[in-house]
Amino acid sequence: METLISIRQLVNQFGTQRVHDGLNLEIYRGEVLGIVGGSGSGKSVLLRTVLGLQPAFSGEIYFGSTELTQLPPEDFTRLKQHWGVMFQRGALFSSLSVADNIEFPLREFSNLSAQECRELMYVRLEMVGLERAVADKFPAQLSGGMVKRVALARALVLDPIVLFLDEPTSGLDPVSAEEFDQLIGTLHRNLKLTVVMVTHDLDSLFSTCDRIAMLVDKQVVVGTLRELLANPHPEIQHYFSGGRARALLRGN
Ligand SMILES: Nc1ncnc2c1ncn2[C@@H]1O[C@H](COP(=O)(O)OP(=O)(O)OP(=O)(O)O)[C@@H](O)[C@H]1O
């Protein structure tokens, strides 16, 4: 397995509250990694630190051979063009049409003509299962599921190597959530993407993720679902012991 992102001895703290304490995590190229943990365990802080939205207190984060925590902002911005990020509520620009939202990174970071941007935008729309007519709509006119798909199209527009998803199915009804999981799985297979997703959704975890990193004791325990289930740590056992988790496991 080739490591794409390596997090080493990461420490994050706010005042005297330590959120991560010597956290180590290897993210492999081509895998779908789910990040889980109880409320307040530090999932968002971990994601924000890797994305460079929040400085690490200490530790190192490598993307390939490049160490990120000391990288000058302009170099980080350039490198992040290879990353697709989808935030929890889609984070679309409400004053821009769907087309302009999806084309935004292209106009920012590529030298493509307006016509080429438009064509690529339509390709991405189709990729996420939306009709061309959606391009002219504004975010307020879309359903929750459509907002997520548009946000995903925008995250994919620069052909990323890695896709970060923050709670991709939150707020969706079960059918839309399942469809979205299937879409992520299809894109992962077709585009050979590495996917890192923070999720509370056990269905997503069970159906889509190759490995799971669970935040426990300010660090992560990582493994396949089977490996985590065999881990005797009380918090891990508790996380997977609810009725819903057991029912899904029986189904598996
Ligand atoms: N900017 C900040 N300033 C102070 N404390 C913070 C800040 N950001 C996060 N924290 C604290 O760090 C801890 C971890 O927060 P984080 O948002 O990463 O948890 P989480 O696992 O994503 O939780 P949830 O599942 O509820 O979203 C929490 O105790 C939170 O209050």
Image (cartoon, grey):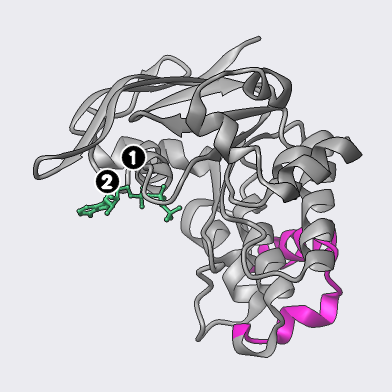
| Rendered image: mark on residue 49 | 1
Query: Residue 13 at what x, y percent from top left?
Result: 19, 39
Side of 125 relative to 205 (left or right): right
Q: Is residue 202 above or below residue 250?
A: below
Query: Residue 44 at what x, y percent from top left?
Result: 40, 48
- Quarter of the image where the N terminus is located: top right
Query: Disc 2, ligand 1: is the CB inside 8 Å?
Result: yes
The residue closer to the viewer here, 179 or 1, is 179
Q: Any magenta on residue 116?
A: yes
Range of residues picked out in magenta: 114-139
Q: Earlier in the sequence, mark 2 or mark 1?
A: 1
The residue closer to the viewer here, 183 or 72, is 183
Looking at the rendered structure, the number of numbered marks drawn on it comes to 2
Query: Residue 119 at what x, y percent from top left?
Result: 77, 63
Q: Quadrant of residue 230?
A: top right
Side of 15 relative to 233 (left or right): left
Query: Disc 1, ligand 1: is the CB inside 8 Å?
Result: no
Q: Is residue 62 above or below residue 19?
A: above
Q: Which residue in the rendered view is the most extreme toward the top?
A: 1
Callout 2 amino acid: Gln
Q: Is residue 13 visible?
A: yes
- Residue placed under numbered mark 2 in the picture: 54
**Majority secondary structure of magenta residues:** helix
Callout 1 amino acid: Thr
